[in-house]
């Protein structure tokens, strides 16, 4: 969709809070001439199925802003080049756009994968997103946060963090009692168990 009135964009994000597939279909210029998505009518079939699965999880156990929900957890097994990093980017933007004060961490099996694939893909979809201008994206610092004045940027953000088994603390303390703490692990099977164990501590409150 084209960028439109800010109030209308905010209303659309509110309406699609529990419908990630509809949000993705609305917030990117699918099929629009002159864009990278000119030959794409929407997300791929497998991406759409995963987004619908996530939406079903959310609608079955909606978050009321106070009572913690069960973690929404999804794993994807697939080959290379099928669009996992693209979907990760869409999910990051969906969560941040529909859940004020959401806070996330993204990592990958290597720093090269994280920087040149996962986080680079976030940059691409941030530029394409109808509400991308709501957020500050930094490649050098590896983070993205809400851009509006008066917002606590440390409370509404996502960080790309290379994992280090000697520094698991960097994956601890991801809590957001009134919103959505989230993790995305790219090439997750190669990430050490220690990182997974620490990350589990971030799935105890809010809408993880």
Image: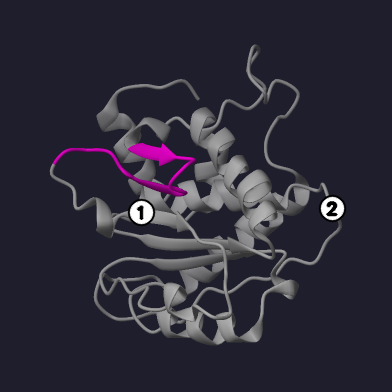
Specify the quadrant that holds the C terminus.
bottom left
Q: Is residue 138 left or right of residue 68?
A: right
Residue where numbered disc 2 is placed: 80
Q: In this view, does 151 lie above or below 8?
A: below
In the rendered image, residue 2, in percent from the top left (x then y), is placed at: 46, 20
Q: Give the range drawn in magenta.
A: 135-149
Instruction: Work out how far the residue at label 1 is from the one at label 2, CA to CA, in angstroms.
Output: 28 Å
Residue furthest out toward the front:
166
In the rendered image, residue 125, in percent from the top left (x then y), is placed at: 56, 36
Residue at x 62%, y 41% (from the top left corner): 121
Asked whether residue 128 is in view, the answer is: yes
Residue 63 within the segment the image draws in magenta: no
Residue where numbered disc 1 is placed: 157
In the rendered image, residue 108, in percent from the top left (x then y), is placed at: 64, 62
Residue at x 43%, y 85% (from the top left corner): 201
Residue at x 46%, y 67% (from the top left corner): 182
Earlier-in-chain disc, 1 versus 2: 2
Residue furthest out toward the left:
150
In the rendered image, residue 151, in percent from the top left (x then y), is placed at: 18, 48
């Amino acid at each position: 969709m084209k960028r439109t009135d800010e109030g209308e964009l905010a209303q659309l994000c509110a309406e699609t809070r529990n419908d990630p597939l509809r949000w993705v279909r609305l917030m990117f210029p699918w099929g629009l001439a002159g864009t990278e998505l000119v030959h794409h009518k929407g997300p791929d079939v497998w991406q759409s199925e995963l987004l619908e699965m996530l939406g079903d999880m959310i609608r079955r156990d909606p978050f009321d802003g106070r009572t913690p929900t069960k973690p929404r957890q999804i794993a994807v097994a697939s080959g290379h080049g099928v669009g996992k990093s693209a979907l990760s980017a869409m999910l990051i933007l969906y969560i941040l756009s529909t859940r004020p004060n959401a806070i996330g961490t993204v990592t990958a099996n290597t720093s090269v994968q994280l920087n040149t694939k996962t986080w680079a893909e976030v940059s691409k979809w941030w530029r394409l997103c109808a509400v991308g201008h709501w957020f500050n994206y930094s490649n050098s610092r590896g983070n993205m946060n809400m851009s509006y004045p008066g917002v606590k940027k440390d409370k509404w953000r996502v960080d790309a963090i290379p994992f280090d088994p000697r520094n698991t603390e960097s994956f601890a303390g991801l809590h957001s009692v009134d919103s959505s703490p989230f993790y995305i692990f790219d090439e997750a099977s190669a990430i050490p168990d220690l990182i997974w164990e620490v990350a589990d501590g971030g799935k105890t409150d809010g809408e993880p």
